[in-house]
Image: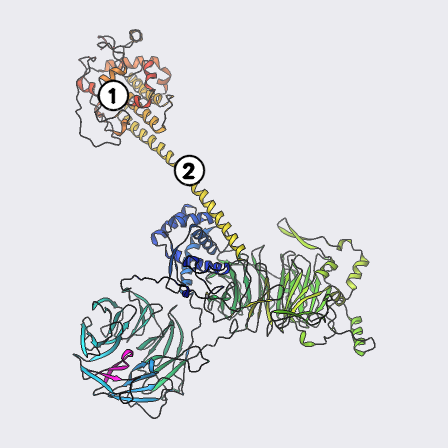
Amino acid sequence: ARGGWCVQPEPTASDASETMDGPIVAEPEMGLPPLSPRSMFTRKNQRREQASMQLMTHLDSSRVKLVKQAFEENGGSVDLYEFVRTMQKHLPPFVYQDSGSSDGGIAAKLTPEELTANLVELFEEVDVNGDGDMEWEEFTRFMVEKAALFKEQSTMDKVSVYSHNPRLGNDTTHRHRESIDGITMLPRHQQFGVIEQHSPYITLYNARSSNFVANLRCNAVPLGMCYVEPLNALVAACSDMTMVRWNVGDCPRKFRYQQHSKWPTPDTQMSLCWQKQHALLYSGSVAGTVHSWDVEKREQRSCLYGHTDIVMEVLSIDYLENVVSASLDTSIRIWDTYTEQQTTKLMGHSKGVNSLAYNSSHRFLISSGFDHDVFIWSPFVNTLLYKLKGHKSALVGCETVEGTSELITADCNGIFKLWDLRNFQCIDTFTSDHEPGDVDDLTGCLNCFGHVKLPPNSPNQEEEDYRLVAASKKLFVFDQERIRKEPVTDDVPLRIALFNEQSLTIFTTSECSVKIWDAVLGTLKRFYKNVAPADISAACLDDRQRKFIIGDVSGGIAVYNYQNGALMKSFTQPGSSPVVQLTYCDTSKTVLAAYTDGIIRVYDENDIEICQVLRTFDEAYMHVGDLNCVAYLDAGSIVASGGNDPSDGVRIWDFETGKCDLVLKTDNYEVVTMQYLDDFPLLVVCSSDSMIRFWGMRHSVYKGACVALLPNDLPPNARVLSGDSPETSSASDEPYVGASPVPTPTASSPRARRMSRRRRNSSMGAGNPLPMAADDANRAPVTSMAWSKESECIYCGDESGHLRKWDLSGLLAHLDTGTLQYTHTAGRRRVGISGGSGSNMDHEMLQGMLQRDPFERAVEFLRLTWAFETAHEDAITVVQLNAAPMALLTASTDRCVKMWGVDGQPMGLLLQGIPANVKNPKWNLSIDVAGREGEEQAKTARVMSVVSERELEDDERKKIEAADNERSAVAQRRSTIMSQFQSMFSPGDAAEHGDGEDGDETVGTLGNHSRASGATPHQATSTARRETHDRVLGVLNDVRTMHVNTASASRTDMSSDRSVGSRSLNSSHRVGDPSLRDRNRRLPPYMDRTDDALEYPPIELTGLGPGLDARLRSQQARVRRQQQQEVLDSAPKLAFDRSKLPPLPQVRPVEVEPMPTVVPPSPGRAESLDPEVVASLDRLNAELNNIENDEGASAFDVKRSTGADFTSRPTSKEAL
C-alpha cells in the first residue's frame, strides 16, 4: 500500500449487501446467487452513469484535440452514429471503475455493446435540444457541467449544524485563572484534558457533563499532550525539557491519575502524536526537529531534521504510515516512518502553521495557521488542492469529524465554520450565544478547541452524539443538532412532482431546490441545491424529458439540464407575479406560462440561447382576480383559464391567436383545477364547492353548456380501498353506479320539498346550490386530476387526501360528441370533429339534450370505480398518470410522494434519509425491466450496425482515394520530368543548328512523339506502370531527336532504306532487333529487367558529338515534315540549347556503388561517332529493352514498323 498498490480480498458471500431488490447482489461468477432482473437493471444504470463520467476523464488534451478535429471535418457537428465512431476511435482502452463497491472499486472492461450503449446515452444527454446533431460547443459545455456534477453528486445529505449549549461548561467547582492553551480528547474514557497558561496542572473533565474529574500536577508547565490508548496513558511535554507519563482510565484506583514515568528530552517539545503501527510517540521541538520515542523504554529512537523553526503540530496518518509536521517556518513536511526520510514538502502558507488534520474518506490533509485561509492538500503530491476562504482573523485550529465529510475551523475571534469537504462549501457559521462584553463572548479570546464523538446516551438512540469543546478562560460546549428523519419524502409540503418515463426518475421541488428520485429503488438520486433564485412555484418537462423548466414566485422562468441541473437558458419578459402554471406544448415546441396576475404568455423554446415571447393572450379579457390554473388541449388548440374570482368565470382562449373565444359563467364558486379530456371537446372543472362539472367546448354541439354535474362524494355502494386490500362499504354485489350524494328523502319531508324547489330553480349555468351530502366529511374540493384516454377514466385527489377513480365511458357514449382532429392548411391549424351524432340531431333533439338536468345525467351515467379515502393525510396537490409503467403518481402537502396502481393498490412511498443505491423498503413499483432491456439492446444493435456500415464505406473510399492519389502522383512525376526537359529549349537557339523553320519543325516532331507515346493503345496490367512506360518513352524519344538524327536527306533515300530492310551499314542485324540490344546492353549489372527503370539512378547524357552537325538536323526535319504534316501544324515551336543540357533528374535513386560510364562501342557503329554518345545511346537502348520485357507487347514495335524508331541507322556512307 505504501508503494501505491493494493491487494483486494476475494469476494465472499458475506460481502453481498442487501441494496437492490433482494438479499444478494453479487455477480454469478463470484459463486453467489445471480441478481434479479430488477437489481441487474439498477446495477447497469448505476454503472452507466458512473461510466459516462469516467469516459470524460479518459479524454486528455491530445485526444480532445483529435475529437475536435473530427467535429470540424464533419462541418462542426456530428450525428449519433458519427459521434459513436469518433469516440470509439479516440478513446483509449476503457476500464470502468465501480466506485460504489465496498472494497474500494472493481475494475472491469466494458464490452463493445456496453460501450456503445454508454455512448448512445451520452449523446442523448449532450443533445438536450433534440435536433439529432451535436455541436462542439454542446460537447465541451457538457464536459464542464458533468465535471461539476461529479464534484457535487455526493452533497445530497444535509449536514447537521452545531449550536451553543449554555448549560454545560459552567462547573463552579473549578475555575481557570489563565487562558486555556490546549485540549486533548480521551474518547475511550469520555473525558478531555486541558492545560492552562503558566500552570503546572493538567485538568481532566467529563466529556458528557463537562464536570471536573481530576488535576494532574507536573513539575513544570505542560506545553503539549497526547493520549496513548494502548497504554491507557496521557503523555505531556513540559517546559523543563522533560516528558511525563500519567495513568488514566482502566487501572487500579490507587494508581489512577498518578505519574507513571518521566524522562528528559534534548529540547523543549511543543507537540505530540502517537503512531500506532510502530508504537512510537512523535514530538516536535522548539529547535525544529522531530523526535520519535519508545514510551515503555523511555528512550529516543530517531530524530528528523528539516524544519528551521518551532514545530507546532505533528500528526500521524495511520493509513499511509506517515507522520506530518507543521512549523512556524511556514512549511509542512511528510516523513516516512520506515525510512525516517522526508517524502514531501508542502509550501503555500505565508505565515506559521499551527494545526493539522486528516480526512480519511477523501484523503485530504488540512492545515491552518496564522494566515486566515484553510489549505487542502493531498499527501501524495506537493500541490495545493484547494484554499478555503471566509475567516477574517488568524486561525487557532482545524478538526475533521471521523467518518464524515465535515471540517470545523475556528479563528481567534471565536467564529466557527462548518465545511463540507465534498464540495468545499461552508455549511454553517456559528459562535457562542452571548451579549457583547459578557463572559460568554469569545471575541478575541478563543485559544483552542477539540471535537469528541460520544456514544448514544439512550438505548433508543441510534446515532452517536458529536460535541465541540472550545476554551478561552472557560469552557464552551457546542452540540450538533441531530436530524431525525421522519418517514416522509421531504421536510416541506410538496406541491410539484413529475414522473420521467425516459430515465425512470421522479422530479420534485423543495423550496428553491430540485430533487431527482430513482423510480426503481425509491431513493434520492440527485439533489440540485438552490437552482432557482426564489421558491419554485411551477415546473414542467420538455417533450424529450431531457430538460426541466421551472418558474418561481418572483415571476422568473428558466430551463435546466435534467441530468446535471445546469442552467441552459432563461425566458424573456419575466412576470411581476408568481408563475402559477407551466405547460409544455409538444407539437409546437412552446411553453405556456400563466401568472397569478392573469397574464398568459406563449414562449418559443426552440431557440438555443433564450426563450422569446411569441404572443401574449388578450389582456383586455384577462382575469381580474388571481389566476389559479390553466388547461391546454392540443387537439383543439384551445386554452382554458380559471381564477378565484367567481365573476371572472372560466375563459376559453384560442392558442394560435391568443383571443378569448368563450366565457363560462361561475356565479358563486372559484375554480380550483381543470382538465381537458383529450380528443373530446369536453372540459372538466373542479370548483371550491366540491363539485365536478363537465362543459362542452367549441367544435361541439354542447359548446358552452354544462353537460354533467358530479359531487365529489362517495355513493352509497362505493368500493372503498383501505391499506393493501380492497374493502367495500356495502355488501351488495350490484354494480356500483354513481348515485345521489344523499339518501333519497320521502316526498312529504321538508327536505324533499327543498330539494325539489332547488331542482326547479336550477339552470344549466351550473352555479346553483345543490343538496348537501349526508356525510360532509367525505366531500372536499378536488385539487388535482388526471385523465386516462385508454380507459376513459379520471383520477381525482381532493383537499382531504381522498383518491378516487371515476368511469366516464357511459357519459361519453351518451353524449356522443365525437373526437377532435386537426390538419395544417395554409400554415394554420384547422380543427374539426370526427364522428359523433351532433350533425344528425335536429333542433328539438338538441334542445332536449341541453335542457336535461346535468346532475341527473351524472347520476345515471357516471360510475365510481374505486376510492382510497386515506391515500394522504392532507391535500393532494399532484395526480399524474404514467404510461410506462402504468401507475399513478401523487404528491401531497403531508410531505409524501406515493405511487399507486391503476387498480388503487399502493405501490410505494419515497423516503428521505436512505443512502443512495439502497432500495427503499417501502417502494415496490412494478417496472417492465425486460421490455426496456430489449428496446435498449435493439437500439444498440442498430447503432452498431450503422457504424459498421459507415466504417466499410470509409474503407472503400480511402482505397479509391489512395488509388487516385497514386495516379495523380505518377502524372505529377511525368509532368515534372517533361517540364524539366522542355525548359532546356528556347526559340532563340534554333539559328545555331539551322534555319528557324527547320528547327521549330524538328522540336515539333519531338513533341508529337511524346504525345503519341502517351496515346498508344496498350493494355497493361497496372495503370501506374503503363503511365511510367509512357513517360519514359516520351523522354527517350526526346533524347533520340537530340542525339541520333541520322535519317536520309530525301524521301527517295528513305524509300531505299525501307527496301533494304532497315539494316545498318556495318551490321547484319536489323535495326531494333532484340538480339542486337541484348548483345550490346549497357545497363548496370544490378538493374533487374523486371524492375522499373525509374527506381534506379538516371543515365547521364553527354554533349553532342562532332559528327552531328546542323545540316543533318535540317535534313531530318524536312523528312519528318513530309511524313507527319498534320502533327507539325499544332506542334509547339521550341529550339534545343545544347549548352544547357543537364543530366536527367534522379527519380527514387538507389544507393549503390558507381558503375563505369564508358564502355566500348558496339561493332555495328560508325567509327566517326563520339564514344560518349554511343555509350549514352546504348544505355538508353538497354533501358528501353528492359521496359519492353516488363510490359510484354511493347508499344515501341508499332513505332518501329513506321520507321520512326530512334535506333535506325543510316544506309549510306555518304549520308553518314
Q: What stretch is highlighted in magenta?
A: 222-250
Q: Can residue 540 be seen in this view?
A: no
Given residues 1185 and 129, the one toward you in this image is 1185
Residue at the image position 37 percent from the left and 36 percent from the top:
962
Q: Which mark is residue 956?
A: 2
Q: Where is residue 520 in the image (x, y as percent from the top left)?
A: 51, 63
**Magenta segment: does it hold 225?**
yes
Where disc 1 sits, the SS reads: helix
SS of the residue at dot 2? helix
**Image quadrant of residue 394?**
bottom left
- The amino acid marked with disc number 1 is Ala
* Label 1 crowd (10 A; few <14 / some 14-19 / many >=20): many
Q: Can residue 259 be seen in this view?
A: yes
Label 2 Cα neighbours within 10 Å, binned few <14 / some 14-19 / many ≥20: few
Q: Mark 1 points at which residue?
A: 1182
Q: Does the magenta stretch include residue 165?
A: no
- From the viewer's perspective, is residue 771 above or below residue 52? below
Dot placed on the residue nearer the N-terminal end, 2 or 1: 2
Instruction: Determine whether, in the image, residue 745 is placed left or right of residue 413.
Output: right
| In this view, 375 is above or below 1184 | below
Residue 119's x, y, as percent? 44, 53
